[in-house]
Image (cartoon, rainbow, N blue to C red):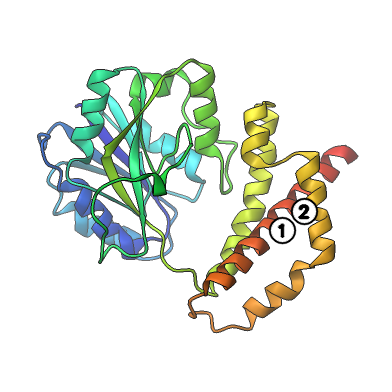
């Protein structure tokens, strides 16, 4: 089998059917040339029922694994272990692939068989009103290995041991694997025609608490990333340097985030945030990120 589309899902039942139907509707590639492998990472919503229903309509090989919630790194490894494709194509469960998606990943691999292939990503607020399928610099990402849309030879992934399962919380598990791939001399190429739409719905007041929670988790995993790879690229990516931390501490003293958090808590949870409020939400998440980084550094110094 030439390729596996591998995705992990957690409590995204409302999106999952559409995401998988797009994976099945591939053009310019034989139905038996690729498969789709989904790992349900301990979802508590209707995900199992949706997967059971979608399986009846699959037009290519389709496999589902159910596991207790263990985080993306462990779920990705489980999915890869179940897959049969010579190339593994990673996407997320909030991504809608375009009809030539698999064919374009494979076309790029024919030119550079040992390389990582990064596909184009277009951010969209809804899957019901998609912009034209033409990638532009507006959606540029400098990530070397980003599992929203990336593929690589299965043999290369296995040689490096897959994803590091010490990353159980949110953030950095794909960046960590990307660093190992980069340090091992793996070439990377970009194919904007291997295109996906990435859902970025309007931020609502209820999303702010999740943003803050994820920012704190991302700070903790940032420290784990640096422990594994004490490299300037990690410092640049995570922003975890003495200057940044000191500047953010000063900002928290000047404008304590608690007041901003209280204002968001008082809003209607379903209200859509204005541009100014979105900036405030991002500032709140950034404050939480650096506060957690400071806590991690204090803990490390006390040992």
Per the image, label 2 sits on a secondary structure element best described as helix
Q: Is residue 221 visible?
A: yes
Residue sitting farthest toward the front: 137
Upstream in sequence: badge 2 or badge 1: 2
Residue drawn at x 21%, y 51% as measured from the top left? 22
Q: Answer with left or right where residue 113 lies relative to residue 180.
A: left
Identify the residue under disc 2: 248
- Specify few, some or many for label 2: CA neighbours under 10 Å numbering under 14, 14-19, or 20 or more: some
Residue sitting farthest toward the right: 302
Q: Nearer the viewer, residue 138 or 69?
A: 138
Q: Are marks 2 and 1 in contact (CB under 8 Å)?
A: yes
Q: Is residue 66 visible?
A: no
Residue drawn at x 60%, y 36% as measured from the top left? 166
Residue 263, position in %: x, y?
67, 79
Residue 207, position in %: x, y?
53, 68
Marker disc for residue 287: 1
């Amino acid at each position: 089998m030439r390729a596996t589309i591998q995705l992990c899902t957690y409590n995204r039942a409302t999106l999952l059917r559409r995401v998988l139907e797009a994976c099945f509707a591939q053009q310019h590639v034989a139905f038996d040339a690729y498969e789709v492998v989904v790992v349900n990472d301990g979802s508590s919503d209707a995900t199992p029922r949706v997967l059971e229903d979608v399986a009846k309509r699959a037009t290519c090989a389709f496999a589902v694994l159910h596991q207790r919630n263990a985080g993306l790194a462990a779920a990705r490894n489980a999915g890869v272990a179940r897959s049969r494709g010579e190339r593994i194509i990673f996407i997320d469960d909030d991504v809608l692939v375009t009809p030539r998606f698999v064919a374009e990943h494979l076309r790029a691999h024919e030119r550079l068989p040992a390389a990582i292939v990064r596909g184009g990503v277009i951010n969209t607020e809804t899957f019901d009103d998609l912009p034209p399928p033409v990638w532009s610099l507006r959606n540029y990402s400098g990530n070397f290995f980003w599992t929203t849309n990336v593929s690589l030879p299965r043999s290369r992934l296995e040689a490096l041991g897959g994803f590091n399962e010490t990353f159980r919380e949110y953030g950095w598990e794909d960046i960590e694997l990307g660093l190992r791939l980069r340090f091992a001399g793996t070439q990377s190429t970009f194919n904007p025609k291997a295109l996906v739409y990435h859902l970025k719905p309007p931020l609502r007041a209820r999303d702010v608490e999740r943003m803050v929670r994820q920012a704190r988790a991302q700070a903790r995993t940032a420290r784990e990333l640096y422990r594994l790879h004490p490299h300037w690229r990690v410092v640049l990516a995570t922003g975890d340097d003495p200057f940044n931390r000191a500047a953010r501490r000063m900002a928290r003293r000047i404008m304590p985030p608690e007041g901003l958090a209280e204002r968001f808590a008082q809003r209607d949870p379903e209200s859509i945030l204005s541009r100014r409020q979105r900036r405030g939400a991002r500032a709140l998440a950034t404050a939480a990120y650096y506060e957690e980084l400071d806590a991690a550094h204090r803990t490390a110094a006390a040992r």
